[in-house]
Amino acid sequence: MNDITVAIIIPVKSFNARLEICLEKCLELDYPNFKILVFPDVSFSDFAGKIKVIPTGNIGPALKRDKALEHSKAEIFAFLDDDAYPERDWLKNAIRHFQNEQVAAVGGPAVTPDNSPMLETASGNVLASPLASGPYWYRYVPGPVEMEVDDYPSCNFIIRRNVFEESGGFSSQFWPGEDTKLCLDITKRLGKKIIYDPKVCVQHHRRPLFLPHLRQVAGYARHRGYFVKKFPETSLKASYFIPSIFLSYLIAGVVCSYFNRACALFYLNSIVFYYFLIFFHTLFSVLQEKKVKSHFKKVKLILLTATGIIFTHLCYGVFFIRGLFSRKLKEEKR
């Protein structure tokens, strides 16, 4: 399978330190037949050998990725974010799946690097928790098995070029969420498969808690709420509604508690149970982590992660509802 040609596609605003690490790690891949295409807004110093820099002007990441069709004839496109970098066997583990003609694309986990600062580690823990990401936690830590999926993020997404072209690419101003449209075309319109493989792994830096993390969560939630109407085949799922239902419960509980003492007691007990569930789940998860040696840092990480999960629920619930009732998102208005 080493004769299959691969283009690694990296959209970026401008050159930065994390992109430099990404490129270094890509050059260490144990797969021989690849080139790297970097799409910044404006040009910066070109690289020799496998790396080519192609300026695009000020356009969104989805449209940058689509430009791969103009600049590469590789059989496989491997999409990667500039703040992520691949494990050494990333491509080798992904390419084997393309022996099956029904497999159109492969994705894998985007894991928080071990050397991340505390607030980024906490953000990664929030995303990796089933209490925050629900059934999609496997996107942030290696899941137990390979499986077929119908929607997958573009930060670690590897696809046949001919399928990418036939589906029309991302062809979208949506960001985030451009990957939902592409995955829908692959699975529903073309009838092909997307495979999740826990061994197709990249390391992905996180937005630190709290505001940068919550801004990212708000973007995800707003788009997913809107996609419930626009792409219901993959977005109309009960799990996406849970944070908004929880938010509604909180608001209704406060109102009812004002008028009824028994209701207030039940509401208070349920909130206490909710917090302890999050706290003890986080406690167990963090204590399993070998990368955090200091007991003080573990306590701090437990408190940050537990609080991050709660605020993530609330933020997602609010912005999911906003997206659900939006007539158009700002990208479409432009």
Image (tube, rainbow, N blue to C red):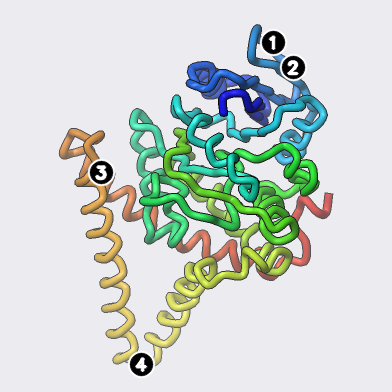
Q: Give amino acid for label 4.
A: Asn
Name the residue: 65% across, 40% down: 159
Q: CA distance from mark 3 to mark 2?
A: 42 Å
CA–CA distance between discs 1 and 4? 69 Å
Q: Viewer-proximal residue, 225 or 263? A: 225
Q: Position of residue 193 (x, y in %)?
A: 61, 53
Quick one: label 2 or label 4, which is nearer the N terminus? Answer: 2
Mark 2 residue crowding within 10 angstroms, few (<14) / some (14–19) / many (20+): some
Mark 2 and mark 1 in contact (Cβ < 8 Å)?
yes
Label 4 residue SS: loop
What residue would you read off at disc 1? 46
Q: Are marks 3 and 2 in contact (CB under 8 Å)?
A: no
Of labels 1 and 4, earlier in sequence is 1
Disc 3 or 1, which lies upstream in sequence? 1
Amino acid at pointer 1: Asp
Dot 4: few (<14), some (14–19), or many (≥20) neighbours within 10 Å? few
Q: For residue 326, which quarter of the picture?
A: bottom right
